[in-house]
Image (cartoon, helix red, strand yellow):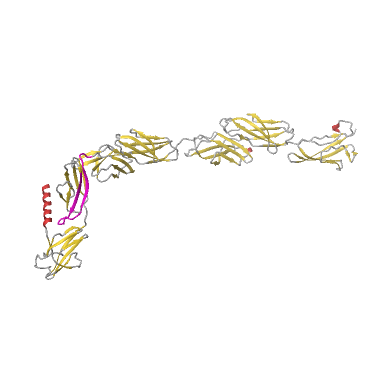
Amino acid sequence: MKKLTFLLVMIFLMGSLHAQFTSRLGRFQVDQVRGCAPFTINITTTNLLTTGECTGLIPCLVDYQGNGNSQQLQFPADFKFTYLTGGIYKLVVLYGSIGPDDITITVDPNIQPAFEVYTCSNSQVSIKVTDKNYDQYSINFGDGSPVVQIPFSNNQVAQRSYASNGAFNISVRGRKLNAANNCNSLTQPFQAITTLPVSQITALTAVDASTLKLDFAQLPNIQYKLEIAVNSINFQQLQTLYGVNTTTISSLRLDDNYYCFRLSSFDPCTAQNSYSNPVCSHKFTLTLSSDLNKLDWITSSGGVTSVAVFRDKGLYTSIPGTPITYSDNGITCNITYCYQLKSTFAGGGVSTSLEKCGKSFTTIKPTKILNTSAVVSGNGVQLSWLQDPAFSSTNYTILRSPNPTGYFPLGSAATTNYQDNSYATNSRFCYKINYSDQCNNKSNDSDPICPIRLQGAMNNKNEISLSWSDYSGWLLGIKNYLVEKYDKSGTLIKTFNVGTATSFFDDQPDPKNQLVSYRIVAVPTDGALVSSSSNQVELTKEINLFFPTAFSPDRKGPAENEVFAVNGQFIVKLEVSIFDRWGSLIFYTDKNEPWDGSQLGQPMPIASYVWTANITDLAGRSLKRSGTVILIRK
């Protein structure tokens, strides 16, 4: 077969070297009818059938491009023409005596033929012409050996063994059948070596769920064979690679399988392979559970030296050896985390997995609120509480109940304070509080929070009795109660520490303060908490008037019975009027002066007299009192 091919090539060359091409009617000849631009042809004779044509005596016209632009030319000096652009042209010779004749000239694009140079061991080289534009190719191996001619085929290959290692320039020129050998050649450098280098996969990267990208260290003039194994080490050839350092493999199922690859430096002269270390992808899954993101992966059990776990694009941890799982408990709920694996294989190749993302969560119920303080004021009640700092609240819900059994939503708060302006002491309100944390988990309701409800009463001696409800809302309860007493202006008069008692009796004399108010303060056992306080109870003491029912202004008895006067406590202004039995005013004073039983210096007779008193007390009240007094004379 080789001998037959060589014979055909030689016949082709011999025909090309010595051919003359005759015109359509056989009147003239040219040396070439086909070639690459720029292409020069010569009309070698114009008198195949005539004598003396196309001379000075018998001129003719020549149209080289068949476009009507003919010129009168003389043989042989003017019978040469160069075609600069590709195309098919009709060369016409117009004889003056016998008419025109023509021949077709084909000018091809001047294309440098593409070819691949494959390094073989033992200073050998293999050439594969990948060009499809020509019918024949000439190969010059650059070592002074004869040019090799190969015809067009689907496997245009030629090989050469060099005498020694070294650098050579290999060129290839293409040629059409029956064409001039004037097309440009393409030259590539080549380094002959003794042993092919072992290939190395540098990176295997998951692009998406069906695509892997493979990168490798490319060496010049090496033909590579890429092999694949699915979930195993049974490799099968996948691709032949040349002149690239990366390739993409598609139509895979990375969520269902893992894929291993190895790359060989292929020796086409001996059909031998030098394999790289395998590098494998991951079958990677992310499982989310309460307070835990679990990463699991399956890959080849051999060749892995370490696995790096990336979280949100940054290196999170690196695990030596060949792990196949990792549990991440350093997470915060309701945050989306993205993970990616990078396994390093023996030889330095790195396999990068798909990125898997998920929103973390927890089912842990936040601690209920254990300590709440309640401060009652004229604007309602202010609730303030402490929450377990291990949880972050997004919203608090306040519930209220008019009785110990039924609690209903009252409002919400973003902070640890809530003001209930509709609180009323006599409604006996109690509260509960719960909250949702940032993980959307809801705490249990707190224990009931019942503000202190204070009540007060006063007897006819202006002695005051106080009683109050026990405060609930603190885990460790109260340390003691304080009774605070205030005057009319709101200034604290005195504080009484009553321990854990829930009542107090104030019988201490206090002639200065008619209007007093009281408040109960609960002091917590836990000193970190704010005290709670009750409503204020305001009490106004009575003026308690003192006056005689009879008097004797004759200076024969005790001095206190000599005059009539009205006295009392907490009086700011006093007007006293005395009338006889006919209603006539006989005495008046606004200076608290006593009546000595006379009118205008004249003693009044023994009788019963009516008195009235208009009073303004310290509390600002206007009061009116009246009575009778008997005037006695002895």
Q: Quadrant of the C terminus?
A: top right
Q: Is residue 618 magenta?
A: no
Left or right: residue 320 compared with residue 492? left
| Residue at position x 72%, y 32% in the image | 463
Q: Is residue 184 magenta?
A: yes
Q: On the image, which quarter does residue 495 sit in? A: top right
Q: Using the image, determine if residue 595 lies above or below residue 148.
A: above
Q: Nearer the viewer, residue 293 or 150?
A: 150
Q: Nearer the viewer, residue 164 or 279?
A: 164
Residue 232 rendering spot, x and y as whole percentages:
27, 37
Whether residue 34 is visible here, answered yes or no, is yes
Q: Using the image, determine if residue 448 lies above or below residue 152.
A: above
Q: Which residues are magenta?
A: 167-196
Whether residue 427 is visible here, answered yes or no, is no
Left or right: residue 293 compared with residue 434? left
Residue 374 rendering spot, x and y as whole percentages:
59, 36
Residue 85 rendering spot, x and y as whole percentages:
22, 60
Left or right: residue 427 compared with residue 31? right
Residue 281 rendering spot, x and y as whole percentages:
31, 39
